[in-house]
Amino acid sequence: MMKISAARKIQNELVEKRETACNICGAVESRLTATVGGCNYVRCSVCGVERMFEYPTESDVMDFYSKDYMTKKFNDLGHHIHFTPEYRATYFSEKDLTFSDLRMDLKKYSGKNLLDVGCANGQFLEYASKYGIRPLGIDISKEMVGVARKNGLNCEVADLFDLEGAYDLVTFWDVVEHVMDPLAVLEKTRTLLNPGGEVVIQTPCTGMVSELFGEKWLYYLPVQHIHLFSQEALFALLSKTGYSITSWVRFGSCNPKGTIPDTNKRAIDTIVKKTGLGDTIVVRAGRTED
Ligand SMILES: [Zn+2]
């Protein structure tokens, strides 16, 4: 009897360890960083990535996205208005600025294949088309893909892991923070890239701003944001999965338009950008050749 219960205890401990371990590096050690709406975020002591603790279950995630998620997106925080038609011009000029900051000339991709993962209503597909790029967008939201297709954009409801094909550029705009297994996503993406292919990844970035704001940080959004990366942790993950960083930019200061006076916002945003401390990061990385 003694033996059986000891064995069971060890087995239970193992199950518990698996459930609470970091999906990226497997470590269990972590430190609490924020509690938001009854959900905890912890920072992994080994890889430095913050994650929801515990992770949401698959049904938590499905429930969340099925309940008018996109309608919520329209109404929620200021930065999510980027799905509205009125935001199109601003979106385009933001992208001009981002690619200029990354020293990336999209003309180089004219006639080449782009995959935009999590394309939503297809704004980036439209932007890329201006450069003669051949885009395909994928998204899990039927609703969003429907909107994009109605606008004549090439996209489909698909899961990255079911995809085949060869792409020269793969983009993730505010996507990797939403997935349960970012490492697997990057590994899969690498198999879809042609030699010389590149990825561009935009995601929230932990650091000075997230630490200053604590639980009020804009990007602690339980269920939506499962993993939150520091610059170092993101770079390490890219390197581990077969990419070399070409350039990056950080911008934003947890102050969406309208929350503080415009002059203050401009000043703060300028400072965080110049000092590389912004709370959004965009990284451009190339597939490392074997
Ligand atoms: Zn970890």
Image (cartoon, helix red, strand yellow):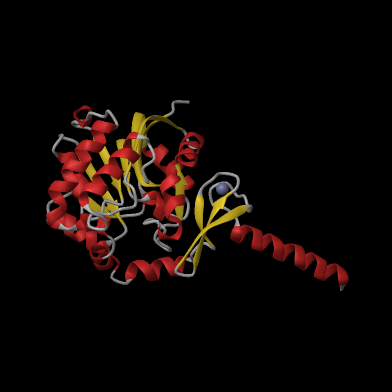
Examine the image and state in which quarter residue 102 appears.
top left
Q: Nearer the viewer, residue 3 or 264?
A: 264
Please state the total of marks drawn on the protein image: 0
Quarter of the picture holding the N terminus: bottom right
Where does residue 21 sit, x and y in percent of width and height?
60, 55
**Horizontal side, residue 173 vs residue 258: left or right:** right
Q: In the image, is residue 140 above or below residue 205?
A: below
Where does residue 168 sit, x and y in percent of width and height?
30, 33
Residue 261 visible? The answer is yes
Q: Residue at x 56, y 44 (%)?
A: 47
Q: Residue at x 54, y 45 (%)?
A: 48
Q: Nearer the viewer, residue 233 or 272?
A: 272
Q: In the image, is residue 86 above or below residue 1?
A: above
Examine the image and state in which quarter residue 278 appears.
top left
**Horizontal side, residue 46 vs residue 152: left or right:** right
**Horizontal side, residue 170 vs residue 239: left or right:** left
Where does residue 84 sit, x and y in percent of width and height?
17, 58
Residue 167 visible? The answer is no
Where does residue 189 sit, x and y in percent of width and height?
39, 41
